[in-house]
Amino acid sequence: MSIDLSNVKNFQDAPVTVMGLGRYKKGSGIGAAKWLMRHGAQLVITDLKDEEELRESVSEIMHWYSEYRTQFTDRDIYQPVFVLGKHDADNFTNVDLVVQNPGVARESEFVVLAKEHGVPIESDISLFFRYCPFPIFSITGTRGKSTSTALLGEMLKHKHPKTVVAGNITRSPLEDLDWLLEETQPVPIVLELSSWLLESIEGLGIGPQVAILTNAYKDHLDRYPSFEAYVAAKELIFQEQKPEQMAILNADQEIMHEIASRIPSKHIYWFSAKSLPEGVNGVYRDGDNLVRRIDGAVTNYAHVHDIKLEGEHNIMNALCASLAAHLAGVLDEDIHASLKTFAGLPGRQEILGEVEGVLFVNDTTGTSPEGVMAALKRFGKGGNIVLICGGSSKGLSFTEMGKMIGEQCKYVVVFEGDAANDIEQSIGDGAPSVRAKSMEQAVRVAYENAKLGDVILLSPGTSSFGIFKNEFDRGDQFKAAFEKLGGKGSA
């Protein structure tokens, strides 16, 4: 049994399993379940988390089930069946389709079982790629992909106010697919794609119109057997492209030039914090100027001092987003306007404000050692930081991070989790550290060890699993603890 995916109408009455519901209200699992339910699929929703953990997500699905029953009287809308706290083999062999949440590893025995029984595996992203009628801009990378995605989205909104920004940025693009199918003029779509989401478009034969790789650092080595395997997953962003589609890469990383040699696209562009070699198309920094050179034509299109986002890494994000926007036909004056006004995303080196002269910074999305080091570089003045870090290990080395903590931190609070020992070992005698079992405890201890002029920085360098629902829950709890201390926003 399998479904003919050539037409959305074929989902009506089809038995489909959604594997992994998740806890983001607009995320991949819930977004896929809502869309499939709306189109008349008979759904089984299965997740290893139990009913208690997924109560909010189940309520959300049931709310939409009632809504759709009222809204779509022209079709059968089926009540979904929930199998929680376990997976049943039957739900992977006796169905027409399995839709896999990106949090589920492709090596899962149930994913393998479905494949063995000839059941096709899709994700919310692969379904979107199949049916989306308009060009897609896709962004991946270890660092900077969310900021670059959101910034490019802001730039493209000047061209089309309905621009869609979705993907790994906690919104499933299936939330927008149905209205997009009714649009007569092209609407720009920007998708942030994690390596896990990219795996789901492998072999699809449909690639993004513009594919961007911001950078590649060691990350997610809990999910991938090696750095090479992780990079291969990132490379999938280019592999499904046609030769006439466009690719954008980071010229300042050696590995990118090797990747470029394997890309099917005939239109490769580069971005760099330095200059680009003669004849190479792309954008680069020249002192205070942001410069674009395409086919010999050189344009100074903005200045570094125009960029509202702070930090060296954000100059790279600004360069890659502005290059993609230019290729999409956005005017330089609109690119310039977005650079001057875009203030960044919550949870990315987000300055919350002060309590009694102590600055609080929420960098909950700093989930790799490189992320922590970027935040320490920006806020550190040689011993003024109280760092809150730690959580669930991704199999990464904390050696360099530990050295930098020794230089920039006066005190470290480490969350209980399987990364704690490695982090403490990497810090050594560099700074005193203590463990915490909750955000409230972590912030209280951090504040007790801070004085006027210090910075309390939440930058975990790890996954959030364990104490928190996800990285945004972790950031929200940090913000709540800051407000409880009497903190007021800085903006």
Image (cartoon, rainbow, N blue to C red):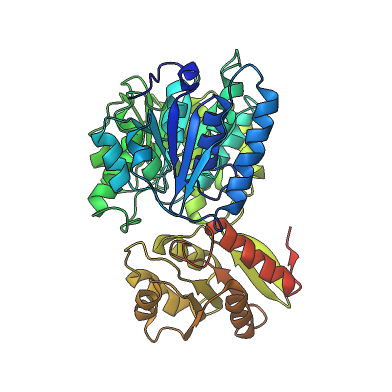
For image coordinates 60% across by 19% down, the residue present is: 75
Displayed quadrant of residue 126: top left
Q: Is residue 469 above or below residue 169?
A: below
For image coordinates 62% across by 25% down, the residue present is: 159
Q: Is residue 415 above or below residue 4?
A: below
Q: Is residue 247 visible?
A: yes
Along the viewing direction, whichever of 456 and 18 lies nearer the viewer = 18
Is residue 49 shown left or right of residue 346?
left
Displayed quadrant of residue 121: top left
Q: Is residue 482 above or below residue 301?
A: below
Image coordinates for residue 429, horizontal then vertical, percent: 39, 87
Along the viewing direction, whichever of 341 and 172 lies nearer the viewer = 172
Image coordinates for residue 458, horizontal then vertical, percent: 55, 68
For image coordinates 37% across by 65% down, the residue present is: 393
Report how many numbered discs are placed on residues in the image. 0
Q: Is residue 344 visible?
A: no
Along the viewing direction, whichever of 344 and 128 lies nearer the viewer = 128
Can you name the residue that lies furthest to the top here? Answer: 184
Task: Please identify the quadrant where the C terminus is shown.
Answer: bottom right
Image coordinates for residue 99, horizontal then vertical, percent: 42, 36
Is residue 464 shown left or right of residue 424?
right
Along the viewing direction, whichever of 109 and 479 lies nearer the viewer = 109
Displayed quadrant of residue 188: top right
Task: Please identify the quadrant where the N terminus is shown.
Answer: top left
Image coordinates for residue 452, horizontal then vertical, percent: 67, 81
